Amino acid sequence: MQRLILLALVGLAAQLVDGALGMGYGVTSSSLLLFVGLSPALASASVHLAEMGTNVASGVSHWRLGNVDWRLVGRLGVPGAIGAFAGATFLSNLSTEAATPVMAVVLAALGVYILSRFTFRPPAQAHNRRSPHGSRFLVPLGLVGGFVDATGGGGWGPVSTTSLLSAGKTAPRTVVGSVDTSEFLVSTAASIGFLVALGTAGIDLGIVLALLLGGLIAAPIAAWLVSRLPARVLGVGVGGLIVLTNLRTILKATGATGTVSLVAWIVVIALWLAAVAYTTTRHARTARNARSDADADASGQPAEAEAVGRV
């Protein structure tokens, strides 16, 4: 019972991250499941089975709000599903000893990507409600994103969402809504791949239901959270947490000594704290400038009205 409560909290925390950033459910939950002792294949399988439920809820919500570009969903989600099935099959055929460091490296790399992305180049803003991207861009993106998502236990959002936002051609709400909706295809294909390769004997439905329950509880909280916490600072915090969660596995796999491990921990934590401080300072400065501009506009309006009255 205690383990299921812990797993529900994992799902809750992961959904809070995903709801605030439009990415991170799989990466965060898989990292925490590995941390509590699940094998890589079972962690990824459990996450993707739970995601099928959260993806439906998320996709319906985005569709009702008009955030879904169905052309983008199809062109991105179908190749994503193919990549996810291939990634699930690949991961299932690796031994636990070989898969654990591989998955840790993939997750840590995604954590570094999220951390650096939100530190130095936050997502661009665009206003197109229909994506202008064609299959030449979306098909390879979907294949890579789906493969990384299945082998790393997450990564569809970090790969797909950030790539589309970086291009700066589609409105963020359309990108997030369409990527979240297409993720159902990716999660379903990955789940089928794991079931074909692993069967159902090793999958604990209690883990899946606990993750799903935590995610459903967190959904409305995430909506509240995203309106109060700056996404840029939250992204840096989450990216660093993912790196730290997987650092222990990587150091153990490489046979790092006590001194080397200590230095690695100190360097990573110091860089993370520096990134948090930097982004917090930049966000505060941007907020101050925005308030100053708003105050200047507000104070300028009466003056202009008074001048018109005198004329």
Image: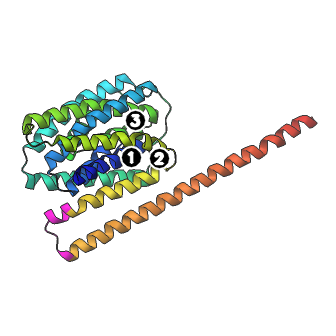
Cα distance in 3D space between marks 2 and 1: 8 Å
Secondary structure beneath dot 3 equals helix
* Amino acid type shown at disc 1: Leu
Q: Which mark is residue 225?
A: 2
Q: Quadrant of residue 78?
A: top left
| Residue 251 appearing in the image | yes
User: Who is closer to the viewer here, 172 or 64?
Assistant: 64
Identify the residue shown where x is 47% and y is 46%.
Answer: 225
The mark nearer the N terminus, 2 or 3, is 3
Q: Quadrant of the C terminus?
A: top right
* Amino acid type shown at disc 2: Leu
Secondary structure beneath dot 2 equals helix
For disc 3, the neighbor class at 10 Å (few under 14, some 14 to 19, many from 20) is many
Magenta highlight: main SS? helix
Residue segment shown in magenta: 249-258
* Amino acid type shown at disc 3: Val
Disc count in the image?
Answer: 3
Q: In the picture provided, is 149 more to the left or to the right than 291? A: left
Identify the residue shown where x is 78% and y is 44%.
Answer: 300
Q: Quadrant of residue 308?
A: top right
Identify the residue shown where x is 9% and y is 34%.
Answer: 196
Cα distance in 3D space between marks 2 and 3: 16 Å
Q: Which mark is residue 176?
A: 3
Rendered location of residue 162, percent (x, y): 37, 42
Magenta span contains residue 82: no
Rendered location of residue 290, percent (x, y): 62, 49
Secondary structure beneath dot 1 equals helix
Q: Which mark is residue 16?
A: 1
Residue most extreme to the bottom? 259
